Image: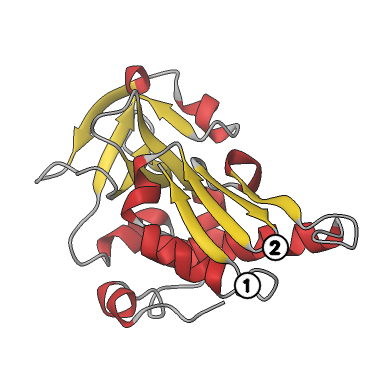
Amino acid sequence: MKQLSARLMKSLSVSSLPATATLQEIAYSYPRGVAKVVLKKGKTQLFKDGNPMVYSGAVDRIIGRPPPKTGDVVLVADGTEKPIGWGLYNSVSMFCVRLMQLEDDATRDPSCALNIEKLLETRIGAAVELRKRLCLPSANTNSYRLVNSEGDRLSGLIVDVFGDLAVIASSAAWVEKYKPEIEACISSINDVNHCKLATIF
């Protein structure tokens, strides 16, 4: 995969943080600040159990000035304002946050915490390795789903390969915002770097 862009490296660095830094500690180092989406009482466990789509009815309040815009990184917190994970905000959808990483994952690997480019690189890389283990592509087929949204822990992003064409499809606004980063990740994969890219929103 390609290295992180210079823009991102300038905007966020976790190298000075402890290896087991919490999301809250990482958020403090985020130069522009990070808004916090606080869940209603009794709603937290649903998302800790793996549902990545935070619906607006589960949200009690949003803390942060200015308020987050569509595509912004936000913390998702329980009623005591303790972060349970982070995701990408959507101001106009019934799913106001797509969770990208839970607190436990971020503590184990802070390099991806609040860092969508690094997360894309890591998760798409894992998806590629899984398809290789499934022998995709193979002598029998060169058409397959390379990234399967929630199945590959990238809620809202689908990438299908049809021979020499890779098609990026979206059901989430964050995919459109980060289209160049997604295309860069896909283009760097050996099995598909010769493919033409098409994007469907």
Position of residue 65 relative to residue 14, above or below, is above
Asked whether, in this view, residue 85 is left or right of residue 124, the answer is: left
Residue plotted at (31% across, 37% down): 81
- Helix or strand or loop: what does disc 2 sit on? helix
Could you tell me residue 43's position as x and y percent?
Answer: 44, 21
Residue plotted at (51% across, 41% down): 155
Q: Is residue 90 visible?
A: yes
Toward the viewer: 169 or 112? Answer: 169
Position of residue 144 relative to residue 57, above or below, is below
- For the residues labelled 2 and 1, say whether their Cβ atoms are less than 8 Å apart: yes
Residue plotted at (34% across, 41% down): 173
Which dot marks residue 128? 2
Residue plotted at (32% across, 22% down): 56
Q: Is residue 20 visible?
A: no
Which dot marks residue 117? none
Mark 1 = which residue? Answer: 189
> Quick one: label 2 or label 1, which is nearer the N terminus?
2
In which quadrant will I find the N terminus? bottom right
- Helix or strand or loop: what does disc 1 sit on? loop
